[in-house]
Image (spheres, rainbow, N blue to C red):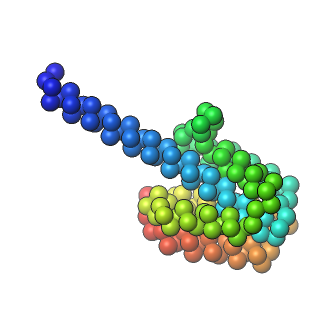
């Protein structure tokens, strides 16, 4: 193999590995910010009901684990970061509006990351959590509307 080919191969491997790492970091950040969003919906009435927490766990299992295969630093599926962040925010009695703002900032900073199929999953999970405890209330409906407007501002399709 010539020196030029070896150099091109090394450059290719470096770029490939760099993109994979960026992608994994981005997915990990996404799941964490999604935890902020789902917490904001559950806590908008200043109380996280056990039914909302149960719904979150079901959503992770049915709607997020199969999306892609990024692992967190501990080797678990990165989708479980949603639950870890959700629990941490609840324990800290974090302000729901601040939690929503965290997710909003991620979407605005990464408009190309949120594809149509991802928007559908986000909205589905958000709606299920909102309806988990005695339907939803005016605050939850307002937040769901804001979420839909936010996601519709991000126009990428799959």
Task: Tell me, yes or no, if residue 116 can be seen here.
Answer: no
Q: Whole-percent x and y of residue 136? A: 79, 71
In the displayed structure, would residue 100 be above or below residue 30? below
Q: Residue furthest top?
A: 1
Residue at the spot 28% in from the left edge and 36% down from the top edge: 12
Pick the quarter of the image with the N terminus.
Answer: top left
Q: Whole-percent x and y of residue 29? A: 56, 51
Residue 52, by quadrant, is bottom right
Q: Is residue 91 left or right of residue 100?
A: right
Task: Tell me, yes or no, if residue 38 can be seen here.
Answer: yes
Pick the quarter of the image with the C terminus.
Answer: bottom left
Residue at the spot 14% in from the left edge and 30% down from the top edge: 4
Q: Residue furthest front?
A: 92
Q: Is residue 1 left or right of residue 141?
A: left
Q: Whole-percent x and y of residue 2? A: 13, 24
Residue at the spot 59% in from the left edge and 72% down from the top edge: 148
Q: Nearer the viewer, residue 120 or 24?
A: 24
Q: Whole-percent x and y of residue 40? A: 72, 64
In the displayed structure, would residue 62 be above or below residue 37? above
Q: Nearer the viewer, residue 142 or 117?
A: 142
Residue at the spot 77% in from the left edge and 69% down from the top edge: 44
């Amino acid at each position: 193999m010539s020196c030029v080919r070896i150099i091109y191969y090394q450059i290719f491997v470096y770029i490939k590995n760099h993109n994979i790492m960026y992608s994994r970091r981005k997915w990990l950040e996404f799941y964490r910010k999604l935890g902020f969003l789902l917490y904001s919906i559950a806590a908008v009435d200043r109380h996280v009901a056990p039914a909302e927490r149960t719904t979150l766990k079901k959503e992770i299992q049915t709607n997020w684990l199969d999306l892609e295969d990024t692992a967190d630093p501990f080797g678990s599926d990165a989708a479980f970061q949603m639950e870890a962040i959700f629990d941490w925010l609840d324990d800290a009695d974090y302000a729901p509006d601040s939690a929503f703002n965290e997710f909003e900032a991620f979407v605005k900073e990464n408009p190309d990351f949120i594809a149509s199929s991802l928007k559908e999953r986000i909205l589905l999970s958000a709606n299920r959590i909102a309806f988990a405890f005695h339907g939803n209330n005016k605050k939850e409906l307002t937040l769901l509307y804001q979420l839909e407007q936010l996601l519709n501002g991000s126009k990428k399709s799959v």
